[in-house]
Image: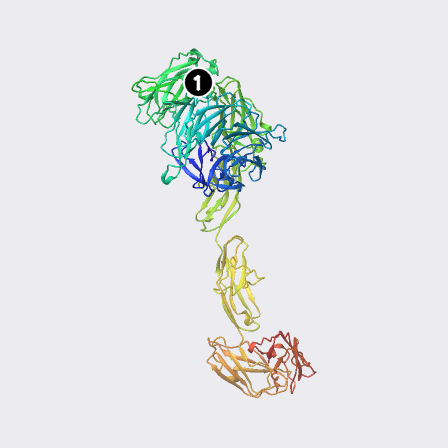
Amino acid sequence: MRRGGRYRRRRRLDVLSTSMPGDVVSWWENDTGDGMSWTEHNIDPFFDRAVTAVVADVNGDGHMDVVGVAYWGDDLVWWENDGTPGDDIGGDGNSWTKHAVNLTLDGANKVWAGDIDRDGDVDIVVTADVAGVVLWYENTNGAGTSWTEHTVDGLFEPSCVHVADVNGDGHLDILSAHLSAGDLYWWENDGSPRDDIGGDGNSWTKRLINDDFWSPRDIYAVDVDGDGDLDVVAAASTLNAIHWWENDGSGGGWTQHIVDNNFTSAQYVCATDLDADGDQDLLAVGPEAAWFENLDGAGTSWQKHTLPTSLSGPLSPHPADTDGDGDLDIIGAVSGGGEAGQGRLLWWINTVGQCSLASTDAAPALIEQGTTTDVLRIVATHNGRSGDTDMELATIELLFEESEGDPLTSAEVTDLIANLHVYRDDGDNLFDDAYDSLVTTVGSFNLVDGIEAILFGDGDPGVQVPQGTPATFFVVIELTNDAGSQTPRQFRITHVTEASSTAEDRDHDIPLTMTYSPNAGTGTMEAFAPLAFSQLPAGGLYYWDDSDTFTVSVNGGSGSYTYRWFLDFDTDRVFNPAQEAIPDMPPDFAGVTTDAFGIWLGPLVRALTGASNPSPSPVYLDIGCYVEDASGPAPPITATDTVTIMEHMYFTQDLEDAYFYTSEIRILEVAVGGGSGLYSYQWLKDTFPVGAGGPTLFFPFAEPADIGWYSCEVQDTGGGMDLISSATILLDVKNAVSIITDPTDGTYYEGPFMHQFTVAADGGYAPLTYTWFKDANEDGIYDLGEELLDDGRILGVNTTTLTINPLLATDTGDYGCYVADAQTSSATSSTATLTVVDMISTPRNPTNATDVLVHIKFIEPVNGLDDPANDVIIVHDPGGDTSHGNVLLVEDVPNLEYTITVVGVTGSDGAFSIRLRTQSEGGDMTPLDWSDTLTVGIDRIPPVIEAIIPDVPTQPDAPSNADEASFRVPFSEDVIGFDGPEDVEIIHDTSGGNDSAHTGVVIEPLGGAGDEYQLRVTGLSGEGFFT
């Protein structure tokens, strides 16, 4: 283990380690910052014979990466620290990406990372004892993804490496040792770079330090004698020696000095100021671990301090402030002595001195006169062993100065400080005089050269500190009420710890040695009289076209002030100008530096919001004034008050004429915008107040008494002065539309007859509209509101009556009327049924039979149709020659169906009609207004014609695949009435998949007489037969 470093960008030192048997590179997280809890994180668990690793920001992204070598793997790689921490910028050590630099470096054993060529990025120096080389790799693109190899020495057996500016020329040189030859060398970085001043790593000169230091294991460069240049320290295992070589300043002359010639199997050495006395001490390890105190600071007198350990095996040491207490501890990795022969990581806490007083600055830069604040925090630590007697503070010396080197007098301190207190912390590390314990108070000052010595009482429990439990003390000052007007009013306080403040044994008052720490004190403090407002800006409610002047008055400070007015739309926050930027004013309103500020609020807010029509309304903002002490140290102050800027009130929903129906639940309603948003409402009917306040006037049961002229007055009750009135509208109340007369049923025979439906309605708002309908739906109900444009609607009729004339069988159905007024009311009548019946069913002309049978079917029972001589009237067409004999009457279904036989019809041309007389159910004999004409004189009916529609054309007048087929139809004598498509029936055979069809039939006479015709079947399609 060679390095400690930060991996999570915070003020805690973590530890980087390598394991050769385990082939693991890990870092250990210093969980609590005091070295008492550690969490291991693997960087690479498969790094073959991991021997050395160091920390550096290789890719320049601000995160600490790791560079390492694997002795058996012959690898030189670096691991990119690319984790994702809580601050969302990566580099928390939780994720690593491995990048290769050289994977064929035989026996790679040591590595160093730094800027060799001075181009601002991290390069790598590496040694390999099997390959016998010293190399450095140039970080070509600065991102660690492109490397250029440079050879420093290709014939060398390196055991170690160190990089430092040996000759003081500003370039980094390289130091190493030849293991088998016992030589120490350094290579001067004397290349010719682009800037023509050398030191770019392109040229190296090898220079000897010593050639008889056998089995050198480690080398280190440090200013041992304090003369300003770098000397060299080395450890040799065969010689059991720790020596250092004094540099003559140029790196060309070296004087050897012995530190220890009896340090068994010395393996590692490094230097640092372990006792904090300002010079360089040495740390060395082999099977044992020890540090050598540089007693005279010149490296000529050394005192060995052995580190306590019972472990065997060589250690790899590194000094670091592992517990964050301000002094250097030692981290070490031991190669043996753990369970099952495994290595261990150890750290030794630096407890130099029997006690320590560590001070930190707690003072603010400005202190208000007449106030009390803590300015120094002193942590007292008993560094003894468990079971030692408690230590107790004896003295604390404080130096009072106006500035560094300018001590204050007792009188000057007395003018500034009324009392000085020392409190003992209650354990929360926060000063609070209500909870912390007062130890002593100094009310009278007697300074000697600016120093006040504070004496603590012997045996006072308040200053006693047990071993292992540090105690925090607060130095607290209470300023005089006029400190801000004193000269000087600036001062600083320093805790003098360099052999001045003291502690002693509690029971025997034996003085304890104090761990060295430099004097620590506050920054420069300044007393001030605070600024205060005697008049604040007063906000209020305003309309967009209002103006006002805002004024503040200030006292305190120097009496000379600067003012800066501003608007802040974030009215929920407490504006703190010390922590937040002051909101800007628009250019047209900026630059006001007086104590009064007059503005037109509407244009100002429009300028701030960019709105030509302000919305929403109201707008809330703070108008404030930021005041600074123009010629004094008093902190600035800010005062604000909330301004509400409103649009004038307006109706977003106004009243319109209202049409109500009796017994309805209805409302009148208005909606208002603008103003403060708080309104009162007064409804008026015929100019008199009605209803409760509110935007809605409720009518729970509309009635004619509600008819009248209505309006609503709205008042701003939130501080505004607006009063607005709605439109005045007429409210009318009528009964809803109702049907008072429904249409009636009717039953008729088909013919020149008429039926009239009539409806009558009442109520509603004129004009009423009438929509007649037939067979509207399966329920017989038609609602125009739900069934607009329904097929049952009868268009063109908008009256109370519907007349049907003449009557056809297709007129049969249910009829009704939908009545609607000019507003929203409607009603639908009951439906009435119209029945129209065709009485004769068979036969139809033509026929040439001598006896004509007519079947008559009535739609209701009849009486009296029983005498063919009187009840059946045969009327012959006078233009023909037809005649008949008897008339027979047969009742087929009682009172409903009859067969009439006209016997002996003769003649060659003509027609006759049949009229009936019957008696209704009521018994009256009335003629039925019915007749039908039958044509006679035909002795032959058309033949049955069967045709096949083939796929290919045939001869004319025969069946074909044309869209039309023609047939000749001859009769033996002239016929009458064979003249329309109703006289021909075409029957298609659709069996077996046939799909023939037609669209029309045309009958054309072929001669002058009626005995020969042409029959054309048109629009033929499909395939199949028809008859």
Image spot of residue 723 (x, y percent): 51, 35
- Residue 1004 located left or right of residue 904: right
* Protein image colouring: rainbow
Image spot of residue 653 (x, y percent): 52, 43
Q: Is residue 697 visible?
A: yes
Image spot of residue 774 (x, y percent): 53, 65
Q: Quadrant of the C terminus?
A: bottom right
Give the vertical position of 522 relative to 862 (above or below). above
Q: Is residue 679 visible?
A: no
Name the one closer to the observer, 285 or 763.
285
Image spot of residue 831 (x, y percent): 49, 64
Label 1 neighbour load within 10 Å: few <14, some 14-19, many 20+:
many
Q: Quadrant of the N terminus?
A: top left
Label 1 secondary element? strand
Q: Amino acid at mark 1?
A: Ile
Name the one closer to the observer, 725 or 153.
153
- Residue 459 located left or right of residue 1020: left
Q: Residue pushed farthest left?
A: 507
Where is mark 1, residue-wise?
A: 493
Within the image, what quadrant is residue 384 found in? top left
Give the vertical position of 493 relative to 547 (above or below). above
Name the one closer to the observer, 173 or 212.
212
What is the count of numbered marks? 1
